[in-house]
Amino acid sequence: MRSVHNDLLVAEPCALDIAQLTFPEQLVLWSIRTWAETPGDAVLIHREMIRACGATSGSLAFAMLRCLLSMLARGGCRPTHCHRLACRVVGADEQAILGLIAASQADDRRYAEAQASQLVMPALRKPFLEAAVLLATTLDEAGWHLPPRYALPRPGVPLH
């Protein structure tokens, strides 16, 4: 692993392929990876959020995502691992962030709090969760829903 911008680290691959993600998940994941890998591209992330959500909502979504990533960088329980932009797989920490946002959209406070406790120090959990809820709400209002993959059965697992 190598360190990149904001103390996010490039991690080893895992099972979930980026092609399995919905557009909102891909947008958030791309934003995280862009933030980590190319620090000068905050303007690019902001522009893409505006393109996806509209001017006001896109600016708010960008601000909340930036807030989440800044809290991870300065108050993470441990270094957060993310893959490079070109990587086709989604890492465990990336999945945790996506799950946090999906849980916030689904009003699944218990799962969101569990994810936050794994990602940030106790002093930052409340503002971290608040930023996640604002980001989730903004994306939701723009019509971008993240599926709660954490609550879905894994491929190959019987449903009975």
Image (cartoon, grey):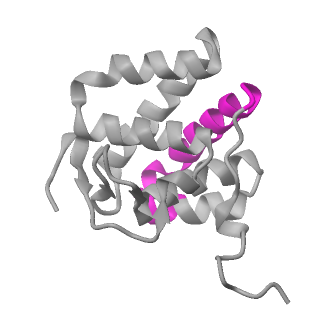
Q: Nearer the viewer, residue 102 or 26?
A: 26
Image point 23% across, 32% down: which residue? 38
In the picture shown, does residue 27 fall above or below 44?
below
Would you identify the image quadrant in which residue 108 lies? bottom right
Percent of width and height locating residue 20? 57, 56
Q: Residue furthest front?
A: 19
Q: Quadrant of the N terminus?
A: bottom left
**Image: magenta residue range:** 116-143
Q: Residue furthest top?
A: 55
Q: Position of residue 103 (x, y in %)?
A: 68, 54
Q: Is 46 placed left or right of 108 in the picture?
A: left
In the rendered image of this protein, does residue 52 appear above or below residue 111? above
Is the magenta region chiefly helix, strand or loop? helix
The residue lying at 42 percent from left, 60 percent from top is: 93
Measuring from the top left, give residue 146's x and y in whole percent.
67, 46
Q: Is residue 150 left or right of residue 127?
A: right
- In the image, residue 95 lies in the stretch drawn in magenta: no
Q: Nearer the viewer, residue 21 or 40?
A: 21
Q: Quadrant of residue 105?
A: top right
Horizontal relation, residue 48 to residue 60: left or right: left
As displayed, is residue 103 above or below residue 141?
below
127 inside magenta stretch = yes
Number of numbered discs overlaid on the protein picture: 0
Residue 134 in which image quadrant: top right
Identity of the residue furthest to the right in this view: 160
